[in-house]
Image (cartoon, rainbow, N blue to C red):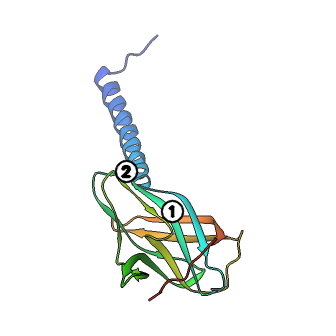
Amino acid sequence: MIIMQNPSYIKEAYMKVIKKILLCVGMLSCLGANAADIEVADAFVQIVPHNNKAAAAFMRIENHTDKDIALVGGKSPISENTELHTHIHKNGMKTMVQVPEILVKAYGEVDLEPGGYHVMFINLIEPLKEGQKVSFSLQFSNGNTIELKDIGVIEAKGHTKHAHH
């Protein structure tokens, strides 16, 4: 003998399961979207020959959102201070200056590169060596923090003297 269940009960149970699945998928997609808002690529840390107190990180930062996002800070166990810097021309000399943020326009990208924007590690805890791997984090204006691990260290080639602040 086959017992027929109430079709409306089956439909309600089915809808509850579908709603739970959709809720879980929605939550997971939101988590993925936040993680992919900002992408960091091609990162490396460069040491300056004969200077065991500072190093700089360079990379490309891509903004995959429809809103401007700024890099506003960083932290690393390799240095006492981590600052954002750029170079400007002043009185015929190239001078490094600290900046409060590095803006990455909506759906845009910014290259942090020698002679331009960079993340500066000041008062290194220990001198860095070429080939070493380091880790640091970047903080953004949208509240995201990106952890960069095992970033390669290289020595600057053909470094020229310029004024530091």
Q: How far apart are marks 1 and 2 (CA)?
A: 16 Å
- The residue nearer to you, when weighing 129 against 114, is 114
Secondary structure type for disc 2: loop
Q: Label 2 crowding class (10 Å Cα cut-off): few <14, some 14-19, many 20+? A: many
Secondary structure type for disc 1: strand
Question: Which numbered disc covers residue 75?
Answer: none
Which amino acid, by three-letter code, is at mark 1?
A: Met
Q: Is residue 2 above or below residue 90?
A: above
The residue at 28%/24% (across/down) is: 8
Which amino acid, by three-letter code, is at mark 2?
A: His
- List x then y, in percent, for residue 46: 60, 72
- List x then y, in percent, for residue 37: 39, 54
Q: Label 1 crowding class (10 Å Cα cut-off): few <14, some 14-19, many 20+? A: some
Q: In this view, does 112 lie above or below 19?
A: below
Residue that numbered label 2 is attached to: 64
Q: In this view, does 13 lie above or below 91?
A: above
Question: Which numbered disc covers residue 59?
Answer: 1
- The residue nearer to you, when weighing 101 against 75, is 101
The residue at 38%/16% (across/down) is: 4
- List x then y, in percent, for residue 16: 34, 36
- List x then y, in percent, for residue 126: 67, 85
Q: Quadrant of residue 130?
A: bottom right
The residue at 60%/65% (across/down) is: 149
Q: In which quarter of the image is residue 87?
A: bottom left
